[in-house]
Image (spheres, helix red, strand yellow):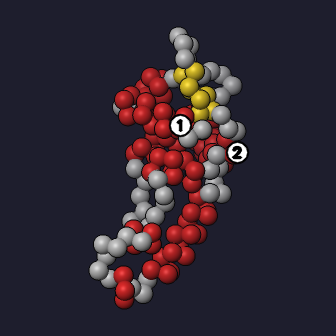
Amino acid sequence: MLKLTKKTDYALMSINYMSYRKDLFVANTRSIAEIYNIPRELLAKILQKLAKEGFIESQNGPKGGYTLLKDPSEITLGEVIRAIEGPIQIVRCIEGDSTCSQTEQCTIQSPLRKIESHIVDYLDTITIDKIISETTDELLEVN
């Protein structure tokens, strides 16, 4: 089953938050952790990873925190998932995992490869700005 971890959820929530609030202030780990009820130590590691991958930038000092380096329209879900999780995979055997004893007679490896390819392509087309607009639309519908 293809399932994203909490780390990816937290990374996406943080980027979304920084995107939505980008003109107002620098987002710090403590404020993001408090708003979304995320363990601060875990969030710090996630934000460091996002900074290392070039999505966000760390700013030191008393008013320090994180800011986006890219426009939300240039960041895709696929990029964020790969930055946090590594390669996107449905099943391990597609990448040559030789621990499966069924590899020689497997009849579903090729169809699964196609499905995985479609999923990855789709994730690489969904951008953070699309998520923000959908979130804003939902908030407007509720109010």
Q: Secondary structure at mark 2?
A: helix
Residue type at mark 1 is Lys
Q: Residue at x 29, y 80 (%)?
A: 101
Position of 111 relative to 47 (above/below): below
Q: Position of residue 28 (x, y in %)?
A: 51, 23
Q: Residue at x 60, y 38 (%)?
A: 54
Q: Position of residue 140 (x, y in %)?
A: 64, 40
Name the N-terminal-most of marks 2 and 1.
1
Residue 137 visible (yes or no): no
Q: Quarter of the image for the N terminus: give it.
A: bottom left
- Towards the viewer: 54 or 90: 54
How far apart, in angstroms, are the residues tagged by discs 2 and 1? 20 Å
Query: Going by the image, does 100 lie left or right of 125?
Result: left
- In the rendered image, the residue lying farthest to the top is 62
Q: Quadrant of residue 58?
A: top right
Query: Going by the image, does 44 lie left or right of 53?
Result: left
Q: Quarter of the image for the C terminus: give it.
A: top right
Residue behind mark 2: 73
Query: Going by the image, does 31 lie left or right of 128?
Result: left
Residue behind mark 1: 52
Please state which of the two labelled residues, at mark 2 or mark 1, is closer to the viewer. Answer: 1
